[in-house]
């Protein structure tokens, strides 16, 4: 069972991932030449990917921790 605090943290991280995917979807319209030539655009895309992946890992860690607590009972 996941406690309320953990559930809230998971939902917050999932919402962040949704926002990051929205930003990345907008960047999909960039053509290759523009993307490669524009350092700021690359930085935004790379950072959104990085933080979304980190949020996924955080969710996985929270779920594993909650299962560990459940298994110790």
Image (tube, helix red, strand yellow):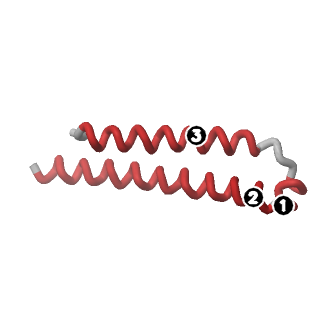
Q: Is residue 4 left or right of residue 73?
A: right
Could you tell me which residue is drawn at 27 percent across and 41 percent down?
5
Looking at marks 3 and 1 on the same chain, the residue that comes earlier in the sequence is marked by 3
Residue 4 % position (x, y): 25, 37
Could you tell me which residue is drawn at 17 percent across and 47 percent down?
70
Mark number displayed over residue 42: 2
Looking at marks 2 and 3 on the same chain, the residue that comes earlier in the sequence is marked by 3
**Label 2 Cα neighbours within 10 Å, binned few <14 / some 14-19 / many ≥20:** some
Report the residue marked by disc 3: 19
* Residue at far right of view: 33
**Label 1 Cα neighbours within 10 Å, binned few <14 / some 14-19 / many ≥20:** few
**Label 3 Cα neighbours within 10 Å, binned few <14 / some 14-19 / many ≥20:** some
Asked which quadrant contains residue 27, the reply is top right
Looking at marks 2 and 1 on the same chain, the residue that comes earlier in the sequence is marked by 1
Could you tell me which residue is drawn at 79 percent across and 62 percent down?
39
Q: CA distance from mark 3 to mark 1?
A: 23 Å
Secondary structure of residue under mark 1: helix
Asked which quadrant contains residue 38, the reply is bottom right
Above or below 50: residue 21: above
Residue 41 % position (x, y): 77, 55
* Residue at far front of view: 40
Secondary structure of residue under mark 3: helix
Q: Is residue 65 left or right of residue 58?
A: left
Locate the N terminus and report the quarter of the image it occupies: top left
CB atoms at circles 2 and 1 under 8 Å apart? yes
Mark number displayed over residue 36: 1
CB atoms at circles 2 and 3 under 8 Å apart? no
């Amino acid at each position: 069972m996941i406690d309320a605090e953990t559930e809230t943290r998971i939902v917050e991280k999932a919402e962040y991932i949704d926002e990051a995917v929205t930003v990345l979807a907008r960047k999909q319209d960039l053509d290759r030449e523009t993307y490669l030539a524009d350092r700021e655009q690359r930085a935004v895309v790379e950072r959104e990917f990085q933080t979304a992946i980190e949020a996924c890992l955080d969710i996985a860690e929270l779920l594993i921790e909650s299962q560990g607590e459940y298994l110790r009972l």
